[in-house]
Image (tube, grey):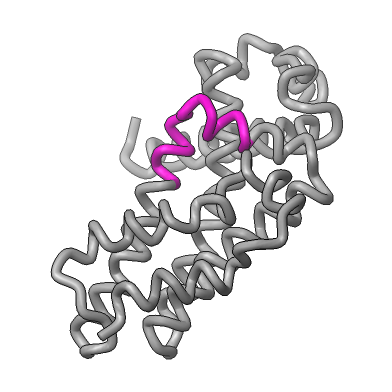
Amino acid sequence: MTHSASIDARRTQNGTRDAIIDVALTLFGRVGFQKTTIKDIARQLRMSPANIYRFFGTKAELNDAVGRRLLNEMEASVIAIAKRRASASDRLRACITAIEESNARRFLFDPALHELIEIAFDESWPSAADHVQTIEKTLSGIISQGAHTGEFRVNDSDLAAILVHNACVRFPHPRLIEERRRKTTPTLDQMMDFCLAAITD
């Protein structure tokens, strides 16, 4: 196979893989990921279940791929916020707020997909673990920039990012969304005020 033919083959494979995830995402949102079978997805795609297993060895792998798609969308918005021309404090607050709002929208309007993300975190799927690392790396970058400009007094930006993320976990964590909605305090702004005060000179 020539180099160009190899590239075309990979593009075709990636296109098929993405199509499988697209259909799975639609069906998962409609009836839930636990009720959706590989046969259901194959039927929608007019292909055999065996063809789907060429791309995903198990249903769990496909579940994780759908979770990764959803979490990647959230990560993209957080990374975009981190690149804004704004103070580190404002960007840090906006990142946590964006995650919380994304989870809240899914909880209200896409409960079946919210369940998938909730279980992904509860069971530590690879997509959830990677997501936490990406978010904390992004927060660390913001904190490091704030420390460089003198806005924050922090020696270890990675540790500070983990501490801020964990302190605010009841807001971005999908499993705690319902509990948070039943309680009024502390608010996200109050929690962020507390965190920023801890790292601000």
Q: Main secondary structure of the magenta part?
A: helix
Residue 20 location, x and y as percent? Answer: 66, 31
Relative to 120, 156 lies left or right: left
Residue 129 location, x and y as percent? Answer: 41, 38
Residue 129 among those drawn in magenta? yes
Residue visible at 62% across and 19% down in the picture: 52
183 up-or-down from 66: above or below:
below
Relative to 112, 143 lies left or right: left
Residue visible at 60% across and 16% down in the picture: 59
Residue visible at 57% across and 73% down in the picture: 189
Q: Quadrant of residue 66?
A: top right
Quarter of the picture containing the N terminus is top left
98 up-or-down from 165: above or below:
below
Between 69 and 110, the one nearer to me in the picture: 110
Residue visible at 37% across and 44% down in the picture: 4
Relative to 160, 167 lies left or right: right
Q: Quadrant of residue 188?
A: bottom right
Residue 7 location, x and y as percent? Answer: 40, 42
Quarter of the picture containing the C terminus is bottom left
Which residue ends up furthest to the top in the rendered image?
50
Relative to 81, 99 lies left or right: right
Residue 10 among those drawn in magenta? no
Task: State the count of labels.
Answer: 0
200 up-or-down from 170: above or below:
below
Between 84 and 150, the one nearer to me in the picture: 150
Residue 16 location, x and y as percent? Answer: 60, 33
72 up-or-down from 143: above or below:
above
- Write down the region rendered in magenta: 117-131
